[in-house]
Image (cartoon, grey):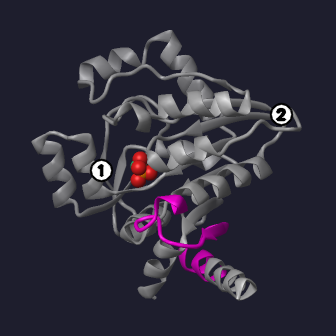
Amino acid sequence: PIMKEVSGLKHLEHKLKEILNIQEVIIVSGDSDQNELVKKEMGRACASRMKKSFTSNNIIAITGGSTLAAVAEMMTPDIEGRKLMFFPARGGLGEYVENQANTIVAKMAEKTMGQYKLLHVPDQVSEDAYASLVEEPAIKDALEMLKRATMVVHGIGDAMNMVKRRKHDQETTQKIIDGQAVGEAFGYYFDADGKIVHKVRTIGLQLEYLQNVPCIIAVAGGASKARAIQAVMKQEQGRKTILITDEGAARALIQDY
Ligand code: G3H
């Protein structure tokens, strides 16, 4: 029965890869909405897939969220001793400390005995503050580094869930609702067609940068995130994205086809 289950998931992976039009799909069994352990398994699958794509010198941009925190927990030192530099993909996004990219990169560096840099920018800065911050030499260096990222690993959030979590102001919340956003990734909110509805004003990786990134890994699961995953993958389709998800999300996604 175990072999059967494995081959069933292989079939699901293949189908989902075709539907989403991305490079690779890895599915762990179970549904992380129902069982916290499944999120840990996604973390393990992601940590091991990251290793496969490491080169001799890595700049790895990481987003926030509880799924990325689970990835960090599962990371281990690279036995080949390759250089790993972890970097937050974007600055403050209004998350709790344990879910912030800054916290997660520090954890990843600790677990892998790698290096990390932080992005110290406050959440939701005004336009004026933003304009002067991007001129700061330290920030400029950070952005240059992000443009040279060899790997981006990001979570995906359900749009309305992220709105609640980040406590956006009234105006932003309305914009996200009116735009019918369903998914969120690196501070960008997307509608069902993958179109940008809103972007949180913070320093860091811009969507355009993804074009030059050789390896993009998205990690998100739970049936409740199916629509969000689909929206974000629409934005990334045709790119070399690798999606790590769970059976709950995968089955819910496939139902629509
Ligand atoms: O941007 C997406 C969210 O950070 C995902 O958060 O992994 O806690 O669901 P989560």
Residue 193 rendering spot, x and y as whole percentages: 37, 69
Relative to residue 24, is residue 189 drawn left or right?
A: left
- Comparing 218 with 96, the one in front is 96
Q: Residues within 10 Å of mark 1 (few under 14, many from 20)?
A: many
**Mark positioned earlier in the residue sequence (2 or 1):** 2
Q: Is mark 1 within 8 Å of ligand 1?
A: yes
Q: Mark 2 and 1 residues: CB-CB less than 8 Å, in contact?
A: no
Instruction: Tell me the SS state at disc 2.
Output: loop
Q: Amino acid at mark 1?
A: Met
Query: Does 28 appear in magenta?
Result: yes
Q: Which residues are magenta?
A: 14-38
Query: Which residue sits at x=66%, y=86%?
Result: 8
Reply above or below: 40 against 221: above
Rendered image quadrant of residue 98 = top left
Tell me the tag on residue 47. Answer: none
Residue found at the far top of this picture: 137
Query: Does 66 appear in magenta?
Result: no
Question: Which residue corresponds to mark 1?
Answer: 162
Reply above or below: 194 against 136: below
Q: Amino acid at mark 2?
A: Arg
Query: Which residue sits at x=53%, y=63%?
Result: 38
Question: Which residue corresponds to mark 2?
Answer: 82
Relative to residue 103, is residue 84 drawn left or right?
A: right
